[in-house]
Amino acid sequence: WFVACGLTLQACRVLHRGNAPLLQWLLLGGLAGLFFLCGMEEVSWFQRVFQVEAPDALARVNMQGELNLHNLATHPTENAFYNGMVVALVLIPALSALRVVDLDRWRLGLVAPRAHLVVVGTVATGWNFNKWNIPLFQLALFVSLLIVLAMASRTADRFDKRLLHATAAATLLAQAIFLIFGDHFVRIWDVTEYRELLLPLGAMMYACNVFAASRRPQGHGSITPRVLKTN
C-alpha cells in the first residue's frame, strides 16, 4: 500500500507540473490518500511497532482491540473493501479494454486501471470460504469469470487468450479447493488474509502503470485497443 501511495503521489506531482487536466491529478491525489489509509489501517497505525496501547474506549468497541478504524465494523468494512476492489481491478479496466466505456473521452485514460489488472482482481474473487455465503461475493466471482472469458474471446493475441483462460480455470479451481477443504484451516478466515496480499499487489501494479504513463509525453498514456497489452 505504501509503495502504491508513493508512486501515485509522484505521478500526481508530475501531472500537476505538466498542466494535466485538474480531474486527473485530483483523482490521483485522492487515490494516494486512500492507499495511505489502507496501509496504515493494515498495520494498525504502527501500533505494535511503537508499542502503543489502544485507548480503553476504542479497545472496548474494536473487534480486535487494536488501534484502527476498520475493526469498529469489521464485516461491513471488509465487504465494502473487497467489492470496491472488484470494481477497481475488474469492472473498470475490463469495460475500458472492451470499449464499453471510453474513459479517454473524459480525459481519464491516463489514470484508468489497465486491462491486465483484471487477472489479479479475478483471482482474488476466487479466494473465499467464510464469506462464500454472502451473495455479493458469489456474484463478484461469476461476473469476473464472465468478463475474463469475454476478454479472451475479443483478443487476437494468443498469449493473452491463454493467460485469460488460465486465469478463469485457476480461479475456479482455487475456489473449489477452498470450499471443499476450507474447514481444515486453523482459522476459517485465513483465506481472506491471502486475498489481502493480492489487493495491495493490484494497487501497486496500478500505481506503477500510472507513474510510467505520467512521465510520457502528453497523449501517450491512454488505453490501447488491445485487450491486455497496454501503453
Image: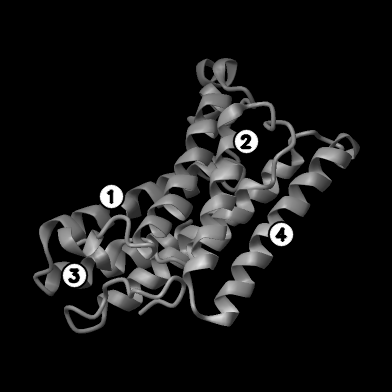
Dot 2 or dot 3: first in sequence order is: 3
Dot 4 or dot 3: first in sequence order is: 3
Amino acid marked by disc 3: Leu
Amino acid marked by disc 4: Ala
Task: Indicate the position of residue 92 as horizontal and vertical percent values.
Answer: 38, 53
Q: Residues within 10 Å of mark 3 (few under 14, many from 20)?
A: many
Image position of 163 (left or right of 68): right
Dot 2 or dot 4: first in sequence order is: 2
Element class at badge 1: helix
Element class at badge 3: helix
Q: Is residue 120 above or below residue 222?
A: above
Does any portion of residue 140 appear in the rendered image? Answer: yes
Q: Is residue 136 above or below residue 223?
A: above
Q: What label sits on residue 81 in the rendered view?
A: none
Task: Indicate the position of residue 117 as horizontal and vertical percent values.
Answer: 49, 63
Does any portion of residue 68 appear in the rendered image? Answer: no
